[in-house]
Amino acid sequence: MDAFEIGMAIRNARKERRVTQAALAQVAGLSRETLIRLEKGTIHDLGFRKLIRVLEAMDFELHVRPAGHLPVLGETMEDDHA
């Protein structure tokens, strides 16, 4: 997953929940401009703590796995039910 995909996931979840950029930025402790750049995937260096605050505000979890790892059926089904 790259910065653009992360940003789109955050943006889509935010819009689905009808949360404004200003509200999410405030909860996460970011400027609205920083959140806009995150959602567009154009931010170069956000920092881990800031990213975690945004993800937590949207009830997301960060999962780490080896690069190039294709999910097996069980993982795909777990993601669908999460």
Image (tube, helix red, strand yellow):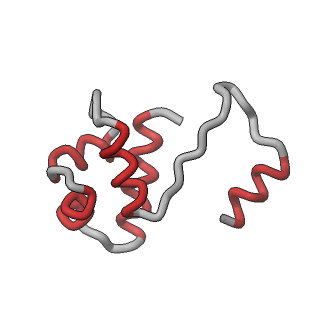
Query: Which sits in the foreground, 14 or 31?
Result: 31
In the current view of this chain or complex, which residue is farthest to the bottom? Answer: 18
Q: Residue at x 46, y 52 (%)?
A: 9
Could you say where residue 67 lies in the image, as x and y percent from the top left? 64, 26
**Residue 15 position by quadrant:** bottom left
Could you say where residue 12 lies in the image, as x and y percent from the top left? 42, 59
Q: Residue at x 23, y 61 (%)?
A: 21
In the current view of this chain or complex, which residue is farthest to the right? Answer: 73
Could you say where residue 38 lies in the image, as x and y percent from the top left? 30, 43
Could you say where residue 44 lies in the image, as x and y percent from the top left? 28, 28
**Residue 27 position by quadrant:** bottom left
**Residue 40 position by quadrant:** top left
* Quadrant location, the C terminus: bottom right
* Quadrant location, the N terminus: top right
Up/down of 80 relative to 7, above or below: below
Q: Residue at x 47, y 41 (%)?
A: 5
Up/down of 57 relative to 52, above or below: below
Up/down of 46 relative to 68, above or below: below
